[in-house]
């Protein structure tokens, strides 16, 4: 799929070309955040995720343009819906960065980004649920499953972050898993890549190109922080790809760690309320750079809790390794499992 490669390159180039200027602009405008996981607590520009948003959108627009002008074909409505959803997620993230919404508002607002996907009824209403079987949700798929899936992935992507390179690294891994899933599936089931799979692959490709390029600037030690304007579109793009491609099984496996992170957060909230202690959002860096945490209450606190020698850089690398094992293991399992009835999609 040449369109996948084009989307990756287009999004990658946008971030590489424009992020340095954006970093200077953010610093001059006073858009500065504290990198809290370092002993020296350096001040670095925040909100650089708007370039990531533009890169994802640009990558998709390029492949849409090729479809329209070269192939003389109409752009699929599902792809347009995904584009609008990603833009809406970015706008919501920008508002959150500006007004710092309360947690309840942050959780609910991403549901707005699912409206374009609902409006065109994107996705296949037939889902195969483990241990239950195949269920046709009919109109309830678009009205219930799509907004819940979009909201969860956007919110959980936003929650599972806060350390240098973590959000972009996780998105790069998940997006690359979707791309592999799409490209390899025809060799397993013997069929041509469907339109839905093609659309999913292009969205994931734009996300992968933008995320992997952003890692150049956001990896340890970060030169820029993404802000919600960057984190929310990462989740929206991933959710759009999974919904477009009807990849419900892959989505469940990919986002198991994100679900665990959310559940640990709930446990922590209950723990703080019952103990009457102060809620702590970030880990505390020691003088040697190792991290001290309140307990194993998030995915990125588990390793520092059990290892007193865990630094931010090492913690992120291990979390990305774990996600890579889960993501590529899921792709392998689902592809190999096709003859056994597990199914590709």
Image (spheres, rainbow, N blue to C red):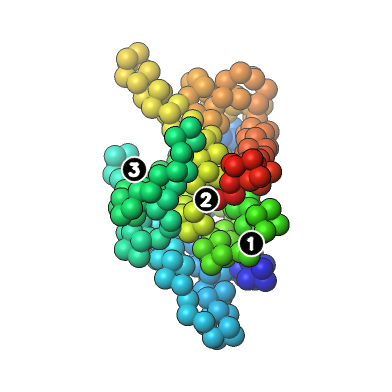
Please tell me which of labels 2 and 1 falls first in the chain: 1
Q: Are marks 2 and 1 in contact (CB under 8 Å)?
A: no
Residue at 46 percent of width and 54 percent of height: 243
Q: CA distance from mark 3 to mark 2?
A: 23 Å
Name the residue that disc number 2 marks. Answer: 247
Task: Let me know if residue 245 appears in the view.
Answer: yes
Q: Quadrant of the N terminus?
A: bottom right
Please tell me which of labels 1 and 3 falls first in the chain: 3
Looking at the rendered structure, the secondary structure element under dot 1 is loop
Q: Are marks 3 and 2 in contact (CB under 8 Å)?
A: no
With 335 as the anchor, is 144 left or right in this view? left
Label 2 crowd (10 A; few <14 / some 14-19 / many >=20):
many
Q: Nearer the viewer, mark 3 or mark 2?
A: 2
Q: Position of residue 51 (x, y in %)?
A: 52, 63
Looking at the rendered structure, the secondary structure element under dot 3 is helix
Q: CA distance from mark 1 to mark 3?
A: 39 Å
Please tell me which of labels 3 and 2 falls first in the chain: 3
Name the residue that disc number 3 marks. Answer: 107
**Where 293 sits versus 77, above or below?**
above
With 58 as the anchor, is 80 left or right in this view? left
Label 3 crowd (10 A; few <14 / some 14-19 / many >=20):
some
Q: Position of residue 228 (x, y in %)?
A: 43, 50
Name the residue that disc number 1 marks. Answer: 191
Label 1 crowd (10 A; few <14 / some 14-19 / many >=20):
few
Q: Residue furthest top?
A: 275
**Where 17 sits versus 214, above or below?**
below
In this rendered view, identify the residue nearer to me: 224 or 9. 9
Q: Residue furthest right?
A: 187
Q: Nearer the viewer, mark 1 or mark 3?
A: 1
Q: CA distance from mark 2 to mark 1?
A: 16 Å
């Amino acid at each position: 799929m040449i369109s996948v490669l084009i989307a990756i390159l287009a999004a990658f180039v946008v971030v590489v070309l424009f992020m340095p200027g954006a970093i200077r602009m953010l610093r001059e405008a006073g858009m500065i955040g504290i990198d809290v996981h370092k002993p020296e607590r350096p001040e670095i520009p925040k909100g650089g995720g708007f370039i990531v948003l533009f890169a994802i959108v640009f990558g998709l627009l390029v492949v849409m343009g090729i479809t329209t002008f070269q192939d003389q074909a109409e752009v699929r409505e599902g792809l347009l819906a995904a584009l609008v959803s990603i833009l809406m997620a970015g706008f919501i993230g920008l508002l959150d960065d500006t007004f710092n919404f309360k947690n309840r508002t942050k959780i609910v607002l991403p549901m707005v980004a699912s409206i374009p996907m609902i409006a065109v009824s994107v996705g296949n209403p037939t889902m195969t649920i483990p241990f239950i079987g195949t269920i046709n949700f009919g109109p309830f798929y678009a009205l219930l499953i799509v907004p819940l899936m979009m909201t969860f992935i956007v919110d959980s992507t936003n929650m599972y972050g806060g350390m240098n390179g973590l959000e972009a690294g996780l998105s790069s891994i998940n997006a690359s898993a979707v791309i592999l899933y799409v490209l390899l599936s025809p060799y397993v089931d013997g069929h041509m890549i469907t339109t839905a799979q093609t659309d999913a692959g292009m969205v994931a490709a734009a996300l992968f190109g933008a995320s992997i390029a952003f890692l150049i600037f956001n990896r340890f030690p970060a030169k820029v922080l993404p802000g919600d304007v960057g984190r929310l579109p990462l989740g929206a793009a991933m959710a759009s790809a999974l919904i477009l491609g009807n990849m419900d099984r892959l989505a469940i496996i990919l986002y198991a760690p994100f679900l665990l992170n959310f559940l640990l957060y709930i446990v922590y909230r209950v723990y703080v309320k019952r103990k009457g202690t102060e809620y702590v959002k970030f880990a505390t860096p020691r003088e040697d750079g190792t991290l001290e945490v309140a307990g194993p209450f998030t995915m990125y606190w588990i390793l520092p809790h059990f290892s007193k020698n865990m630094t931010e850089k090492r913690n992120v690398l291990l979390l990305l390794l774990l996600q890579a094992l889960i993501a590529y293991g899921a792709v392998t399992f689902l592809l190999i499992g096709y003859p056994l009835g597990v199914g590709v999609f």
